[in-house]
Image (spheres, rainbow, N blue to C red):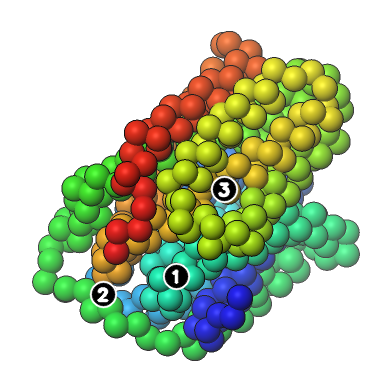
Amino acid sequence: MKLNRNFNLLLTGQSLANIGDVLYIVSIIYMIFELTGSATAAAFVPFTITSSMFISNTLTPLLMQRFNLKWLLAGLQMGKTVLLIGLAFFLPQLSLANFYGLFLLISLVALLDGCANPVTQSLIPNYVKSEQLLKTNGLMETVTQLIQTAMWFVGSSLLIWLSANELVWLTAGLFLVSSLLLSFLETIDFTPSKEQGKWKQISQGWQTVSTSPVLKRIVWMDVLETIAGTVWIAAILYVFVSDALLVDEKWWGFINGAFFLGLIAGSLFCLRFSDWIEQKLSQFIFLGAISSSLVTIFFGLTNLPMLALLFSFLVGVFGQIKNIPQQTVVQTSVPKAQLPTVFTTLGAIGTGTFGIASLLMGVLADAFGIRGVFILSGILLSIVSLIAYKGRVLLWRTV
């Protein structure tokens, strides 16, 4: 697929930033665990990141009203570069006495990171033709999942040769190159009104979503799917491997890996058959949701590790078969000028739901057993498929 210079710059810049994000989180979790010896303290890192991203998703419209999207994205990466340099100077002095200062820096990085995704998703329709959107989304997802799959392994391996502090310096370098590449993007014709009040700016995306029948339906689907997806967080999956499958922790890594490989395979499927999927967006959204539901229930009921591996792979495949067409529907559901606030609203809903649901799912796993939460997840996904089926006339391109 031939893509233009702007999209290639956006893809390369964001890919470097995504690589840096993984390396940074690997180094931080390693440092915290080495300092405290507490798995709980290490697990608090993703909670801090999610909470900060929820806040930034809510407040991002204020930035979008004041800055051009291209320069906003480049500035966010440059801001992360500055914070990472500060973190690199701070880590050699890290101790239990100033331990909580580390979480302040993590929170600030996440605040900037939470703005980047809605800005990126808003830029894509401005840089590619409408008929290339599904292919573009498939390519972005493929590259992102390849990075996620490979870099967790690479990052942990790099700690053999590099210290955590050196890894943070490497990450700062990646963010710097990313921000420079993004600064070469073509400036898009987006001139938001600066006369609106702050509350109006923050609430604009919520108002757009609440008045759009297709976006309201997608929000309900996203909320239920996000709750369902919390069964795949590391802590719950580890309990399933040890208590339900009765195998050692290496299967935890295998099942995680199979899930990410499934995401990649699903993205490649959408990329390969984009013209076909383009004509049947609603059917593929429904197919992905109902298939994910069935496979998740089968995963929760199986006692065989090899079958669990297969089901984990298929959950990733069907998840992407649903999500990539759905992303295309969102990008074409409203005029381009409204996309930034729509994506910040969807991001805030997603991160807020995930933070609450991940804690709730842990409580339910203790109360009803680890298999029960996977069956619950499958039931929630079946409700998502029902919502998709009933709203099939809405889930098409409309702009």
Q: Secondary structure at mark 3?
A: helix
- Residue 369 lies in what quarter of the image? top right
- Counting residues from the start of the chain, the first of labels 1 and 3 encountered is 1
Q: CA distance from mark 3 to mark 2?
A: 36 Å
Frontmost of labels 3 and 2 is 3
- Residue 115 lies in what quarter of the image? bottom left
- Counting residues from the start of the chain, the first of labels 3 and 2 encountered is 2
Q: Residue at x 32, y 44 (%)?
A: 393
Closer to us: 8 or 288 = 288
Q: Residues within 10 Å of mark 2 (few under 14, many from 20)?
A: few
The image quadrant where one finds the C terminus is bottom left
Number of the label disc, if any, that sits on residue 66: 2
Frontmost of labels 2 and 1 is 1
Q: Residue at x 58, y 34 (%)?
A: 292
Number of the label disc, if any, that sits on residue 321: 3
Q: Is residue 389 above or below residue 273?
A: above
Closer to us: 224 or 137 = 137
Can residue 40 be seen here?
no
Residue type (three-letter) at the residue carrying disc 1: Glu
Q: Is residue 331 left or right of residue 319?
A: left
- Counting residues from the start of the chain, the first of labels 2 and 1 encountered is 2
Provide the residue designation for mark 1: 131
Can residue 182 be seen here?
yes
The image quadrant where one finds the N terminus is bottom right
Number of the label disc, if any, that sits on residue 156: none
Q: Residue at x 84, y 30 (%)?
A: 306
- List x then y, in percent, for residue 384: 44, 33
- List x then y, in percent, for residue 19: 66, 65
